[in-house]
Image (tube, helix red, strand yellow):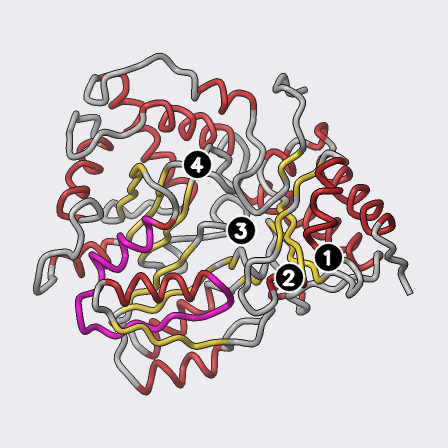
Amino acid sequence: MSTQPDHPTLLIPGPIEFDDAVLQSMGHFSQSHVGAPFVATFGETLSLLRKLFQTTDPSSQPFVISGSGTLGWDLVAANLAEPGDDVLVLHTGYFADSFSDCFETYGVKATQLKAPIGSRPQLPEIEKALKEKKYKLLTVTHVDTSTGVLSELKALSELVHRVSPETLVIVDGVCSVGCEEIEFDKWQLDGVITASQKAIGCPAGLSISMYSGRAIKSFQNRKGPPGSYFASFKNWLPIMQNYENKKPSYFATPSPQLIHALHTSLTQILSKPLSERFATHRAASQKVKKAIADLGLKQLAQDPADQANGMTAVYLPENVKAPELLPNLMKKGVIFAGGLHKEISTKYIRVGHMGVSVTDPSRGHIEQAIEALGAGLAEAGYRKE
């Protein structure tokens, strides 16, 4: 049972509800960021991330840097591409647009391959695009938080390695790491960027990423220096390598409290098989999606193969408006998110179901969400036809 003060249950696609032990770790006493005790904790945290991403390749490298998930885009654009390079961005929603904007900021030419809202680009059209032009990188949003669309990584990576083997496979996993299966080594991924506040279950403020040895070598073979100072691998790579080897090192001051919280969260996640965690998220997702269907509502992602397991994006009935529904749901003790996709933002809402809200059934968060949504819609005048 949680000892946190009473508060509305936060069921948006991140930040999520946190475990008490994680929040208690945020209250850790102050430490030197180059002192042996903190360096040991940071080093263990980096090693735990290898297990979460499922990589045993010593040439791969985890990064944990103070910042939001958005910093991951800068790390990729500033270090793994150069001005004038072409990159292929698979578009499943809002965040592909933003990633493309980031690339353009660094002088990288982003080509978007778009799919209709609620779906994802298909392998034949991706293969066609890869054969038409040489791309330095291909990026895919594993779960687009704006649409709830899940992209398939294994077959995609196999395709890229077969058709365009020099192209690096980069995954935006901000809304997937910790609740969707990712096998970094087996699927031959080159980069996965994420953040602390979603399925990993740690307060916001950490940009977390993993890069393959191939990606690191690509960086080392750059023609010019990285286009960023703070986001430069040149500055961060030796720091991360030293921390993982329990050696004090300094470029910019990390947050000891956030690192302790991340260490606690990762320890909890890895205390059970990852397969069990992913299965638990799938089961909770199916429960939410069945309830939504029973209410007569439709998801943005209508093909089950395209539906994320850590969140659900739901079209509202025509007579129900999000600005009226969401405050009423908060009064009932549940917070959902409004729409984010620019073309349909007023027509749908988003429900997050990840982390402790899923893995700790004693909290009753999933049942609370389903009950509140049904009651809120009824009070808004909605009746299933």
Q: Are marks 2 and 4 in contact (CB under 8 Å)?
A: no
| Count of marks overlaid on the render | 4
Q: As rendered, which of 385 and 318 lies closer to the eye?
A: 318
Residue 51 within the magenta-colored segment of the rendering: no
Image location of residue 92, percent across then percent down: 51, 68
Q: How far apart are the two marked residues, 2 and 4, measured between alpha carbons?
A: 26 Å
Q: Earlier in the sequence, mark 4 or mark 3?
A: 3
Q: Which residue is mark 3?
A: 180
Q: Which residue is mark 4?
A: 204
Q: How far apart are the two marked residues, 1 and 4, measured between alpha carbons?
A: 29 Å
Q: Earlier in the sequence, mark 2 or mark 4?
A: 4
Q: Earlier in the sequence, mark 1 or mark 3?
A: 3
- For the C terminus, the quadrant is bottom right
Q: Are marks 1 and 2 in contact (CB under 8 Å)?
A: yes
- The reply, left or right, for residue 137 in relation to residue 377 is left
Q: Which residue is mark 1?
A: 321
Image location of residue 213, percent across then percent down: 23, 54
> Secondary structure beneath disc 4?
loop
Q: How far apart are the two marked residues, 1 and 3, measured between alpha carbons?
A: 31 Å
Callout 2: few (<14), some (14-19), or many (20+) C-alpha neighbours within 10 Å? some
Q: Foreground mark, 4 or 3?
A: 4
For the point 70% across and 43% down, the residue is 327
**Residue range corresponding to the magenta coloring:** 71-94
Image location of residue 6, percent across then percent down: 67, 22
Callout 1: few (<14), some (14-19), or many (20+) C-alpha neighbours within 10 Å? some
